[in-house]
Image (tube, grey):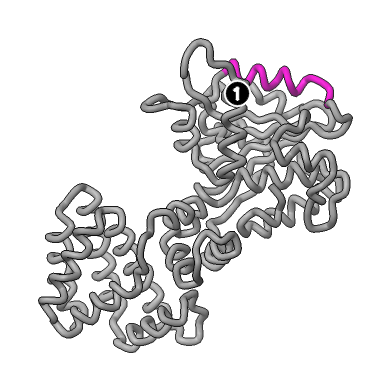
Amino acid sequence: MLFQQVVDQENAGQNLRQMIRQGQLPHALLLYGREGTGGLPVALAATRYLLCQERTEEDSCGHCANCRKMDKLEHPDVHFTFPTINRDKKAKYNQFLSEFREVVLQRPYATAFELFQFFGAENKQGKISADTLRDMLENLSLKSYEGNFKVQIIWRPEFMGREGNIILKMLEEPPEQTIIMLVAESRHEVLPTILSRCQLINLPPLPQAAIAQALLNRHIVPDESRALQIARLAEGNYHEALQLAQHLENDLLTPMRHWFNALATNNRIQISKVAEEWHKAGRVQSRNFLAYVQSMLNQALRMQYMPNGAVLASEAEAQFLSRLASKKYKPEVYAAMSQLLNQTSRAIGQNANAKIAFHALSIRMLPLVHS
């Protein structure tokens, strides 16, 4: 993983590169950011940059011996610790390591749940066991193979529990030329004794523009309009954006336009058609549509009160938002619409009949649209 392959996180990447170039990289770091912000990709990019033999100011070279080993996550001085499951008595950590590498190489933004399913967890809970941590300490006590840095990446330290106290001394006084990077989604679930021994680097949610650009540049979606819709729904989570790109089957602006036109003209026949269409679409698509409508209403509110502000939208969306903002709805009207959308989404998620739910939503939206 190169820094240029990480979606956004420019501030964290720049700080890490600068510390590495100046020889000031702390021996214990905790990268934390919610799901889909890229904690593991950033850690992998920083590790490659640290070990690269021909790095530039901005990134690793990508072709030296160490970079080629990192391409397969098989550098002898880079170690990984991650939560595993009690699969069977014969399952060894090295077996899990091979599967971990496979998952990360294919999906660097994968979640712990996806990893556990790849392990065949079913209903089993993942954990970083005390034995795993002791093995890690033993590996770190050995000299490096390449005569340079050793790097230990601990992915999801939240799964260590109280066993994490085993590594406190290592975090305080690691062997020479040893870097320990912990990658968490919630620092509040990491032991305070571990937090106090690490330098913390926050990874904020990804900007919508960065997610949309990544989807386009990597040819995951075919056009800008679709990329912007997905980025808006993903709410700063690139993993969620990848999931939406697979399951978001249709354009969402057109049905939203039809629905609001039906509400504005009080066209009960068209309202019934909309309810029937989303009933056929299924729960996931229906909830995606409701989330999209809510995000568009938020954009319209901003456009109404900040007409000169930047709006992340396709040309067609911008035109629709402009017309919606021209209605001059009061903030409390937008808030009431948002509340109705949330209630309907929860109801559909709890297996309510989508057709009835959309009919009820439309009836309650009518007075708001005409307010």
Q: Is residue 286 visible?
A: yes
* Residue 50 or residue 259, whichever sits in front: 259
Q: In this view, does 129 lie to the left or right of 149?
A: left
Q: Is residue 208 left or right of residue 276?
A: right
Residue that badge 1 annotates: 165
Corner quadrant of residue 206: bottom right
* Residue 355 or residue 222, whichever sits in front: 222
Up the image or down, 66 lies above or below 213; here it is above
Q: Is residue 369 left or right of residue 48?
A: left
Up the image or down, 79 lies above or below 301; here it is above
Magenta region, mostly helix, strand or loop?
A: helix
Q: Residue at x 50, y 82 (%)?
A: 309
Residue lying farthest to the bottom in this orientation? 326
Q: Residue at x 83, y 44 (%)?
A: 52
- The amino acid on which the numbered mark 1 sits, given as a three-letter code, is Asn
Q: Where is residue 319 in the image (x, y as percent from the top left)?
A: 40, 85
Up the image or down, 286 lies above or below 313; here it is above
Residue lying farthest to the top in this orientation? 89
Q: Position of residue 127 (x, y in %)?
A: 50, 25
Q: Is residue 371 visible?
A: no
Q: Residue at x 52, y 50 (%)?
A: 36
* Residue 330 or residue 253, whichever sits in front: 253
Give the position of the C terminus as an image quadrant: bottom left
Q: Classify 10 Å Cα crowding around label 1: few (below 14), some (14-19), many (20 and above).
A: some
Query: What kind of element bears circle 1?
Result: helix
* Numbered-mark total: 1
Q: Where is residue 186 in the image (x, y as percent from the top left)?
A: 51, 42
Q: Position of residue 266 (x, y in %)?
A: 13, 82
Q: Tell whether position 345 is magenta.
A: no
The magenta-colored residue range is 130-144
